[in-house]
């Protein structure tokens, strides 16, 4: 279960290896690029693959300001706004400005686990 968001102005205590997502920011402490990509995937509701070739762990702070005049702008009480493509452009710009990373849209094969049937375990 995700941790509750802190009150405005309150700082976030991050555990090592954790990516924490707020309406207009993503924070991480000692996270790998693959872990950051996983967090971005959840935030943008589409796969993000780590193609950086970077090893190690990093502290990351990605912040963006949404244009309140756009229908896709995130509000303080909404994690996912109505227009994901608008948020994607904010996040892509913030990644480039804050971390020097670039998001590229490409088609690529990915592994997906599909569960087509489930049953309760039988008693032995």
Image (cartoon, rainbow, N blue to C red):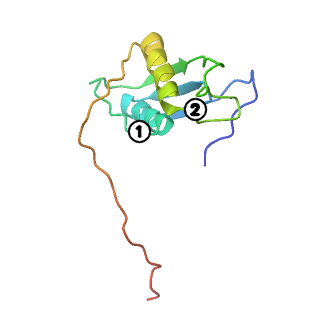
Dot 1, how many residues are within 10 Å of its Cα: few (below 14), some (14-19), or many (20+)?
few
Circle 2 Cα neighbour tier, 10 Å, few/some/many (<14 / 14–19 / ≥20) = some
Q: Which residue is more in the foreground, 101 or 13?
A: 101
Q: Which element carries disc 1, helix, strand or loop?
A: loop
Return the residue nearer the eye: 81 or 62: 81
Q: Residue at x 45, y 80 (%)?
A: 121
Q: Which mark is residue 21?
A: 2
| 18 w.r.t. 120: above or below | above
Indicate the position of residue 12 as horizontal and vertical percent values: 66, 27
Q: CA distance from mark 2 to mark 1?
A: 16 Å
Does residue 37 sit above or below 91 in this rendering?
A: below
Using the rendered image of the protein, determine whether residue 59 is visible from the camera's viewpoint.
no
**Of residues 57 and 94, which is closer to you in this image?**
94
Quadrant housing residue 46? top left
Tell me which residue sits at (30%, 23%) in the image. Answer: 54
**Sequence-wise, which precedes: disc 2 or disc 1?**
2
Q: Nearer the viewer, mark 2 or mark 1?
A: 1
Residue beneath the point at 66% across and 35% down? 78
75 to the left or right of 90: right
- Which quadrant holds the C terminus? bottom left
Q: Which residue does the numbered mark 1 point to in the structure image?
A: 46
x, y percentage for residue 29?
Answer: 52, 27
- On screen, 115 above or below 83? below
Image: 29 above or below 1: above
């Amino acid at each position: 279960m995700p941790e509750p968001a802190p009150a405005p102005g309150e700082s976030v205590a991050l555990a090592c290896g954790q990516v924490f997502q707020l309406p207009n920011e993503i924070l991480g402490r000692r996270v790998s690029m693959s872990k950051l990509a996983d967090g971005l995937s959840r935030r943008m509701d589409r796969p993000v693959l780590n193609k950086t070739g970077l090893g190690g762990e990093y502290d990351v702070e990605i912040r963006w300001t949404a244009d309140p005049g756009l229908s896709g702008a995130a509000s303080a009480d909404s994690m996912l706004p109505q227009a994901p493509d608008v948020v994607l452009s904010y996040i892509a710009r913030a990644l480039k400005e804050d971390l020097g990373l670039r998001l590229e849209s490409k088609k690529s094969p990915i592994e997906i686990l599909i569960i087509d049937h489930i049953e309760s375990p039988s008693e032995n």
